[in-house]
Each structure stands twice: as structure tokens, then as C-alpha cells.
Image (spheres, rainbow, N blue to C red):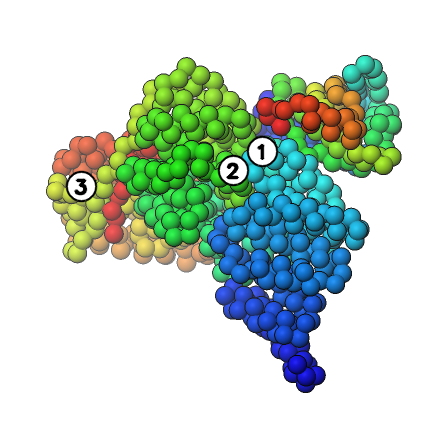
Amino acid sequence: MDGASTTGSNTEAAEQLAAASVAKAAGDVDAMRAALVAAFEAARATGDSEALAAAALAMPSSQRFGVHPGQIPALLYEAYQMAQTPSTRCRLAAALARSWVYGGDAVRAVHFAVEAQRLAVEVDTPEATADALDAALVARWGPDDFGERVSLAAHLDDVAGHVVDPELRLSSHLWRLSTAWECLDILAVNRQLRALDLVAAESGSARAAFFAASRRAMHALATDDLASADRLIARTATIGADVAEPDAAGVLHELGGMRALVSGDLVALRDEASAFETFGTAEGIPSVSAVGASLWLAAGQPDRAAVLVTQLTAGGIDGIARDVDFLLTMSLVVGVASGLEISDIAREGAAALAPYAGRGVLNAGAVTFHGVVDDYLYQAQRSLGEADADHWRHTAQSAYRRVGAGWWEQKLGGAQPFTPATPARSISFVQEGGGRWRLGAEGTTFVLADLKGLQYLRYLLERPGTNVGALALSDAVAGHPGATFDEADLGDPLDSAALSAYRRRLIELDADLDAADTRGDQPAAAKLSGERDALLHQLRVATGLGGRRRVGGASSERARVAVRRAIATALAKIEGQDPGIARLLRDSIRTGTSCRYDPNPDQPIIWLTA
Amino acid sequence: MTGADETRGRELAAKFITFLETGTPPEGLFNPEVFCDFTMPQWRLQAQGVEDIVRLRKGGHPGRGRVPRSRFDTTGTGFVLEVEEEWDQDGDSWYCREMFRVDVADGAVAHLSVYCTGDWGRDLVKRHRETVSLLRP
């Protein structure tokens, strides 16, 4: 190769590396990977080992966890063999270890992790030590390396305290967070969540912000704080859309699946179960399929869950790899097998899980918390009718109390006899043309005239497990969400006097609306609603209160009463047609200043509202 | 113990871990008259007041250390904290396990009972690992 073409290739490598950076900044993972491969090939053509290493080292950031790594390890190895300095060789060895583990082949990673640690001693910088420790952790991600992993993560945290590279700090805090969840060390969990926030704030890195938000969302879901979880999942999605993080979509599915599980949202459960099944089967990732199976079971589709569990255990329980996802896969398989009363799998799986009692069950990187091993042992022993089931229930309950995992503790319930999962029923709750409603199970549907209470019910059914303020519910159904006001904030006597008149008229209107709803007189209800809305608008204008947030007071109280009455009226109408559905709703809908639909897990229903 | 007490207990426990890792007590951790009763495998020491406690701690752990894991449980008067510690000293790496029973008064640690396994050097840790297969690491 002549000098001119060498220069041209060097330039091309630099240009492709720059293009990869641009693609990364734009969040385009595929374009980034293509540019890196082009840079690698250009560097190879000129024998430029540093450019080769630079391209190779950037490649693992385009890898999706658990998915076959393709040619990335081969290219990293080529760069590793050509590397001229211990520092570069150390980084490439660490990257090779990560690439093999992310690609689902942990055995190949060990040699390179050991080599990275040896070279890090030679290089003797905090950055090299931290990089090598990260590789060592990756190579010791199996269930039996726990003690060593905890120690390595603490060591990495200590070393990372001396480096400014946000990626190394991020990695360090994620490892500490993960091991803290594994041993249910809630003090360390909180400390690492704060540390992730700090890395994001100090570095301005969107990637760090993505990890900080997603792990906070995980914590909120684990500790039964759905409102915070929703806010944090939305933030994760917003940041994830702009960041070149190949696992962003996977993280959102993980959080979405867990959110559906915790809230009992059967429609979302079904959607996520399908997504997990499709991806897990297509990519051959057992832990993803196992999550799919558990979601299908929770969605009231035991047949779909059984198919996946049968596939996962086709080679016997021992066929489940003892890798990073062993505890997750095995726990979920045991949980589903217990729920379906597949005794042999539940028994053998419980025996395989027993040595890991006391540990938290997480997916890789602590994206979601799947309870504690003791919980799955309890489920297995309960389904098998074993005497020590209650022992495991007690230890699981103790663990959940320590970390504040209220939903998980509640799910454990008492020591009641085991009942197999009931398949979900679909019930229509649909408003058709002309304002009429069609309700009921297929073949037994009935029609009701429009009622405000039906609209309230539908709004709640579409938001299982979510507290909705009566005032907010009233406003949302009236078509002006967020327009809440409360005269309790009005201190002026003149305004208060005026409000007295308005209040009287509003009370009359509410009563008239209830009566119109009860009669099914929609024209009258529409007219009264219009007058009520106009009155509310006048109030905002007259008092200058539009847009200010208010809490408590007479409007909330009136809304509480109006919503309760409207729902009671609607339930009475439903009862006249189908007492079973009315009872189901009465048992699961709570009204008050705050309203909420809490699905009964023993009677799973998919409400078809659209 | 109320929810507020538990929250304060967790804050104090987090600060206590910082003290273990750095040797410097964060502000608000100790009551000025804090008392410490420190039991080792074959010895017992006591200290009264923040300065004495810091001196006692630095006598055994002069440098920074790590707390790889901990367990926090509330009690009627404060909390119990179980930890593992690791640190490097004199060219060796060291390990111990400790249990702290803490009484809280006026929002700070007022009484501290410490039970420690004693310090295990690298050789002992290695020998233990080769000799004993722990059921739960």
C-alpha cells in the first residue's frame, strides 16, 4: 500500500470515528455501529493500531444485553492482539470480557477479565484499575460469585471515587446498586441512587440521567410508589429517546411490565407479556422468556405461561444456565410452575433456588426488582403442600418489610391455601355511537343509557392501581382535566359571599345532574353540565384563580359527593342488568376524596373500554 | 418506632457507614455524650464522647475502609446495623464483620454497643475460603 492511500485510510478512519460520535449523539445506534466498523476496517488497512483500538473500544456500547454479539468480540480481539501498550491492551481485555458476557457467553469472559486485572496492576492508574474491576465483576456475575462480587463492587466504588470519567463512575454506582439490591442492603441502595443522580447532574450526561431515572423508577416500583414510578418511567422514556443506549427499549419494557404487574393492569400485562415472549423467543434469551411467562400468568393466560415454562425447562431444570440471569430465570420459572401446579418443575426448581435464600431477585443491571428468593420458595412449597412453606413466607415477609416493598409483602398474603391462577375474563365497558354504553361479557352484553357514573367508572378502570382525586376525576370526565379549583383558598369576604350563591347553584346543579343521570335523560344532563361548566368558568374569571393549584376544601367535598353519587347510580343500573359485574365493581372501586380501582388478582378481568 | 424515627434511624445508619469508611463522623451523627461499649473476640474497650470514639476507631482502623454490605433493622430504641468491613493497611488487606446496637436520643446516636469478629488478614480470609464452604456467602 502506498503512502497516499495510507493517509487516505487514516483520514477515513478518523472521519468514520467522528461520524460514529455524531450518530451516538443523535441516538442512532445502528449508524454508530456501521461507522465504527467502517473506521475499524480503514484502520486495519493502514495498520493503525490506535485507531483500530479506538473503533473497537467504542463497539460494545452498541451491544444489546443478552443478544448475540455478532462480530464485535472478534474485532475487539484483533485490536487486542495488535495493541502496542499495556494501557490499551488492558482496556481491550476489559472490553472483551464485557462483550462476551453481554453476548451471553460468560465462560469466554473470564480469561480476559483476569488479563485486564493483571495489566491494570502494571498500568497502575485509577482508571485502569476501575476498568479492570468492572471487567472482573462482569466475569463474576453468576449466582455463586456473590460474595466476591460484593467485595469487588465495594472496591470499584472506592477506586472510582478518584476518577472523574462519568462512565467509570456510572459503572461503579450501578454495580454497587445491583449488589445492594441483591443483599437487600437498603441503606446502600439509597446511597447509590443519590450517587447516580449526582453523576447525572455533575456530568450533564444524558446516558447517566437515563440510568439515574430508570433506577429511581425501579426503586419506586419496588417500594409501591406508583405515582413516582409513573413520573420516572416517563422521564426515562423521554431521555431514552435521545440517548444512544441500545438497551433503552428493553429497559422501558422491563419497567412497563413491572408497572403492569404492580398495578394489576391486565391490558398492559397482556401487551408486555406478548412483547417479552416475542423478543425472548426470537433472540433465545431465557430470562426474557421467563419474564414473559410470569406476565402471562399474571394476565390470566396460564396456557401461554405454560408453553414458555415448558420451553425453558425442556432440557431439565439443570439446563438453565448458571449465569448472570440464573436467579431471575429460575425464580420466575419456579413461580410460574408453582402457580400452574407443575409439581416436578416447582420441586426441582425450589431445590436449585434454596442455596440462594435471602437474596433479592433482579434482572441484569438492577432494572427491575422481582422479589426475593424466599418468596419463590414459599410459592413452590405452598403449591406442593410442604410443611415449611410458612417458614419461607415469614422470611420473605421480613425481607420485604426491611426494604419497604409493600406490594410484594401484600402479595404474599396470609398462609391461605393455594388456589391456582384463574384465567382472565374479558368484559366490555364501551361507549357506542349515540352515547349508549354496551357492558358485559361476550354473549351476555347489555345496553345502558349514558350516565356520568359510567364515565367515571371507565376512567378508573383504565387506570388500575392509580389514585385519582374526585375533583380531578370530575374535571377529566367533563373534558377539562386539570381545571380544578377550590374556594377554600379564597380569603376575601366579597368573594366568599359570591361563592355562597355559586355554591348553592352548583349544589342544585349537581342534584339535578344526578337526577337526570338516574332518569337517563341525556339532553337534560347535557344542558345542566353546560350550565355547570359555565358557572365554573365564571368563578375562575371572577376570582382570578385560574391555573393556581389548590388542595382540599368545598369543591373537593362537592366533587367527592357528586362522584360517589354518580358511581352509585351507575352501579345500581348495572346491577339491574348483571349483579355479578356490579358486585365485581363494588369490590374493586373505592370512592372518596381520592378514587381508585384495585383489581382483584383472584378474579382477573380485562376491561375492554375502547 | 414511628415512621419518622425509622427515617431518622436510616439517616443515622447511613452516616454511621460514612464514619466507618472515612474515620470522620458526619455532623449530627453522635450525641455529644455518646457512649461506646466495644467487644472484640477476647477484649473489651469503652469510650465516652465523640473525640474518644473517633480515637478508638482510628486505633483499629487508621485509614479509609469499605463497607461492602450492611443490614439495617429498627429496634424500639434505635436500630441494629450489621456490616462487613474491608480495608488495606500495612501492605495487607483486612476483613471483619460487626454488629452495632444503637440507641438514639435527641435525633443522634447516644449509645453504641459493638460486637466485632476481630480482624482477618488476607491469609486468614484465604484459608477460611479454602476450608469452609458457606451456605450463604
Viewed as shown, does residue A163 lie left or right of A545? right
Asked if labels 3 and 2 share a chain, the reply is yes
Residue type at mark 1: give it: Asp
- Disc 3: which residue: A440
Identified at 34% across, 19% down, the residue is A417
The residue closer to the viewer here, A492 or A554, is A554
- Mark 3 vs 2: CB contact within 8 A: no
Relative image position of residue A290 (x, y in whole percent): 41, 41
- Furthest toward the front, the residue is A1
Relative image position of residue A438 (x, y in whole percent): 17, 47
Name the chain letter of the residue that bears numbered label 3. Answer: A
- Mark 2 vs 1: CB contact within 8 A: yes
Relative image position of residue A602 (x, y in whole percent): 30, 30
Determine whether the residue tagged by mark 3 lies in a helix, strand or loop. strand
**Which of marks 1 and 2 precedes in the sequence?**
1
Identified at 70% across, 49% down, the residue is A115
Determine whether the residue tagged by mark 1 lies in a helix, strand or loop. helix
Residue A570 vertical placement versus B102 (above, below): below
**Which of marks 2 and 3 precedes in the sequence?**
2
Name the chain letter of the residue that bears numbered label 2. Answer: A
Q: Which mark is residue A144?
A: 1
Name the chain letter of the residue that bears numbered label 1. Answer: A
Residue type at mark 2: give it: Arg
Residue type at mark 3: give it: Gly
Residue A513 vertical placement versus B81 (above, below): below
Viewed as shown, does residue A196 lie left or right of A323? right
